[in-house]
Amino acid sequence: MTSGTVIDGRVCLARTDAERAPLVRRLGRIEGQVRGLRAMVEADRHCLDEIQQIRAATAALREVGLLIIGQHVTVGLDLALHAADRAAVLADLERVLRAAMAEAG
């Protein structure tokens, strides 16, 4: 299970290799999508095709973000139950969620 520590009021995750691998795989696929988009632009493909590729890459990035947020919240809540500086952990969770919501809006 992902663990973490609090450093300077921030929750820092310590993922296992098994937890990190799916994120890295997804990011690799996203890199491929972006390279494909670049090739489409260089080849002057139809704009709709390019926009669809952008939407696919954006959706994939959003999913990676949700996985990262899920891990952060899970670890943060566990730390908040056991950490000496509970307020700092909760403040960090709020900062991360606010940042994620600002991107979604």
Image (tube, rainbow, N blue to C red):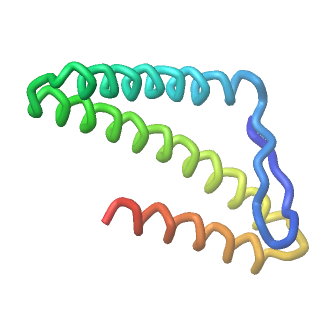
Q: Nearer the viewer, residue 4 or 36?
A: 36
Position in image of residue 51 (x %, y %) = 18, 36
Establish if 45 lies above or below 60: above
Front residue of this view, candidates 104 and 75: 104
Q: Quadrant of the C terminus?
A: bottom left
Determine whether, in the image, residue 1 is placed left or right of residue 51: right
Q: Residue at x 43, y 39 (%)?
A: 61
> At 77% from the left edge and 77% from the top edge, which residue is drawn?
88
- 77 versus 1 height, above or below: below
Q: Is residue 29 above or below residue 57?
A: above
Kindly give the residue lying farthest to the bottom in the view shown. 87
Q: Quadrant of residue 24?
A: top right
What's the residue at 50%, 25% (across, down)?
26
Q: Residue 40 at what x, y percent from top left?
A: 24, 22
73 left or right, relative to 52: right
**Quarter of the image that includes the N terminus:** top right
Horizontal and vertical percent position of residue 66: 47, 46
Q: Nearer the viewer, residue 23 or 94?
A: 23
Q: Residue at x 31, y 20 (%)?
A: 39
Give the tally of numbered discs. Answer: 0
Q: Residue furthest right?
A: 84
Residue 4 locus on image (x, y percent): 81, 50
Displayed quadrant of residue 92? bottom right
